[in-house]
Amino acid sequence: MIALPCLVYAMDLTVLNLAVPALSRALAPSASQLLWIIDIYGFLVAGFLITMGTLGDRIGRRRLLLIGAAFFAAASVLAAFARTPAELIVLRALLGIAGATLAPSTLSLIRNMFHDETQRQFAIGVWITAFSVGSAIGPLVGGWLLEHFWWGSVFLPAVPVMALLLVLGPRLLPEYRDENAGRIDPASVLLSLSAVLSLIYAIKAMAEYGPSPGRLALLLAGLALGVAFVRRQKRIDYPLLELRLFAIPSFRTAIMAYGLSCLAMFGIYIFIAQHLQMVLALSPLQAGWATVPWAGGFVFGSMVLAPWLARRYGPGPVMVWCLAAAAAGMLLMVWADGPWALWVLVAGMVVVSLGMAPVFAIGTEQIITSAPPERAGAASAIAETSSEFCGALGIALFGSAGTLIYRQQLTQAGGEGLPPESLATLGGALAVAERLPAEAAQTLTLMARAAFTDALQFTALTGSALVLLASVLAARMLRRG
């Protein structure tokens, strides 16, 4: 019951991307509306996580989960039959708010249901696996539905899952709440939502369109709101963000490792997805199959490897050495070139997933067990917000740096006189090549693919250094603790 809504939540992050062509034909959204349709779900999930985590501690984690499931099912049905782009944007926003109830509620329930350490580690492994499987099967399920039904059908798989949760959840899931919880501070809710949304929107906008005075101003405003939010948490009796948790070495170490790992992994993954299709010339289905070992590594690493390693060596050493292993996997991707590029890339992804999975599983357990049981929801929300924020930051930073490397390499290879769109992205260069004579098209394609490979190698090397730094920092922080 706990795993199913997590699987649906992860599916909804990816499934709509496949429906964009059919949706565009049916609703005719503008470019701006289309971006909001795709992005607003993730924005509002990130913005409401901290609030929902604390709300679950106050009103009950099971109650919040069931309320969120009901709203998620209802919004999914309405989104499937949306008639205008504005309707779909509003309904995707409601799905994001409902989705923000799922992760902190389910993870904090695990904290209170499983008191045996081995059982709890296995349960967290199942929880992480649900997200991995949801991300992997989202495009497959969406593709099948779009072949047989209309674009809105991609929202409907959530409905029976949430209905099942509403029927069986009250029977199978116990209720937990903080009996001494105080009143939730509306000003803190507004500050946290404004800060997170401003920061993530500014970061993503700069990654897509580059910096501008308006985007930089929004970024600074988000930082200022974040500082104001933290200061308010120190003054109120029942804070949304329990700052005392950061004084606990295991909590602080786990958040640091979680955040830096997400930053590096999300940043590299956007290049891997493009490299598979536009450099190695795989079809979308072949590219999907190439990422299956990556998802399989997360499943095995979360459910089997993490509990075994934690029992044998202890959580601290496992986090340190698994971060080092993930750094080695990213370093392996630097050699993803030539006739063996696909196999090297897949091998690197498998090593990264086997290294990252225990870090996420053990780190998640450290985060929720460091907090008092009555504040497990708030601690869970901190972990998920860290993941969302650092993932967006990784896409922005790595995407910008990789694009800069791509442009420099293509220019140095003789692309000074090319149209601007070919220097902006690899997709732009391949589109320009289609309009050129055969020999010129082949030359541009080879140059662009070589430049993009250099960008992938640079980001893999940078990600490896970042995760290795996380390993060293984790070792030092745990030793001091």
Image (spheres, rainbow, N blue to C red):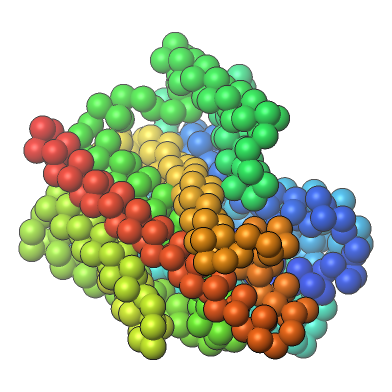
- Answer with left or right where residue 245 lies relative to residue 67: left
* x, y percent for residue 33: 82, 52
Name the side, left or right, on which 58 lies relative to 324.
right
In the image, residue 182 lies at what x, y percent? Answer: 48, 22
At horizontal 23% and vertical 31% (from top left) the residue drawn is 248
The answer to whether 298 is drawn above or below residue 384 in the figure is below
Q: Is residue 377 visible?
A: no
Indicate the position of residue 426 as horizontal and vertical percent values: 61, 68
Q: Residue at x 39, y 88 (%)?
A: 339
Residue at image coords 14%, 64%: 309
Farthest top residue in view? 235
Q: Is residue 51 above or below residue 455?
A: above
The one nearer the camera, 209 or 284, is 209
Which is more toward the observer, 130 or 447?
447
- Visible residue check, residue 424: yes
What count of labels does the image hold?
Answer: 0
Q: Nearer the viewer, residue 109 or 258?
A: 258
In this rendering, the answer to whether 317 lies above or below 199 is below
Residue at image location 41% in from the left, 15% down from the top = 234
In the picture, measured across the screen, residue 257 lies left or right of residue 54, that is left
Residue 345 in percent (x, y) is at: 37, 76
**Left or right of 241, for residue 212:** right
